[in-house]
Amino acid sequence: MIAFTVDDCWLDGWRGRTTLVADDEGFRRARGSDPKPEAHLAGTVLPGFRDAHVHLGLVDGTELLAGGIAAVDDFGWELDLARTWPSASGFPRVTIAGQLLTVPGGYPTASGWAPPGASWEIAAPDDAPAAVDRQLDAGAAFIKIALNADAGPVLDDATLARVVEHAHARGVTVAAHAQGKGQAARAFAAGVDVLAHAPWSERLSDELLGAMVAGATAAGAMTARPMTWVSTLDIHGWGARDADFVVASDNVRRFHAVGGRIRYGTDLGNGPLPVGINARELLALEHAGLGLDALAAAIAPAAPGAPNGFGRHLSVISAEGAPDRATDPAAWLATARLIDHDRLKEHLR
Ligand SMILES: [Zn+2]
């Protein structure tokens, strides 16, 4: 165990100069009974950055740590491969969805990026619980469904409801790829917890956004829960900011303004995206109205299961050479590099 100070620290809020401890579990804030700090780590420290939407089947997962990403949520792949990722050496911390749940002939069965085994087709409502169990029994930590009306048939309301109900009964959340007019609203009404992408098919009404934040529909339906959106703004043009970008960005701006929770996520693997921190995604979020604190909350959530901790990686931003954090928060965050628990001593003085 070693205790050390850092210049500044983010953990669900700015903590100023802080003493951290590295022990067998990883990093955490010091408690009263811990030894006095004996070293210093220069810079500002945050929990290791997390990309909340990736496809490890399409990138080399061993490159992510060097790119500044300490944790990822994999949004769909073949079970036999995906189940190996959470314990794969050289990978960041990984949670998987397993297969995307869809209907026969539905997205992504006919899209180029996903192999056949990356999705599982549900033909009738009664097949939904077994489809969910299949993923969870293989190690999935959440369920991903496809509701892409632009690319084929989608789950009907009865099947959608059964998927969500069974996933929640088993204690996991449900994320949806909602695309096509009305699909984001359907996902919300069914109790889906997470949108895999900020919606771009249409401008969502202020009323719907407010309901998504509150977790209740105007009619007071009890199935709905507060929603989290994964950003993925940069998939729309990869810097060129196309028409879909404008719609998605406007939805994010208004969702954030009424208190909606946004997670940084890139859909890594689909398109020319950097294997690591995507500075354009952060900048797009800044331009959609997220300030420094909201950006930090989006990309550096506390490690799950460690409410007073950081997990096995720290994101560290050097005081030297970084952009100004008050005026350029996205660019500032994008300079973060990871420090591995096992190599901490090289960085202390
Ligand atoms: Zn995806």
Image (cartoon, rainbow, N blue to C red):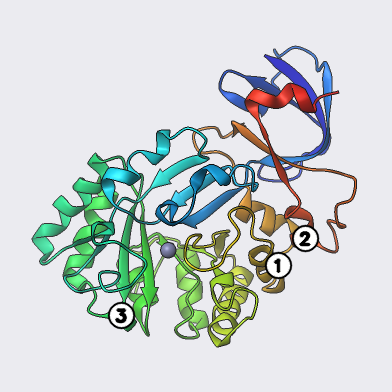
Left or right position of 292 against 48: right
Q: Residues within 10 Å of mark 2 (few under 14, many from 20)?
A: some
Extreme residue toward the right, this view: 320
Q: Give the Cα separation between the discs numbered 3 and 1.
A: 29 Å
- Residue drawn at the location 41% of the way across and 38% of the way down: 86
Disc 1 marks which amino acid? Leu
Quadrant in which the C terminus appears = top right
In the rendered image, which residue does mark 1 sit on? Answer: 283
Of 60 and 149, the residue lying toward us? 60
Of 55 and 259, the residue lying toward us? 55
User: CB under 8 Å between callouts 1 and 2?
Assistant: yes
Of 55 and 126, the residue lying toward us? 55
Task: Classify 272 as above or below 52.
Answer: below
Task: Classify 88 as above or below 132.
Answer: above
In the rendered image, which residue does mark 3 sit on? Answer: 151
Chain-order first, disc 3 or disc 1: 3
Task: Classify 203 as above or below 169.
Answer: below
- Residue drawn at the location 57% of the way across and 46% of the way down: 63
- Residue drawn at the location 23% of the way across and 73% of the way down: 106
Does residue 195 appear anywhere in the picture?
Answer: no
Q: Residues within 10 Å of mark 1 (few under 14, many from 20)?
A: many
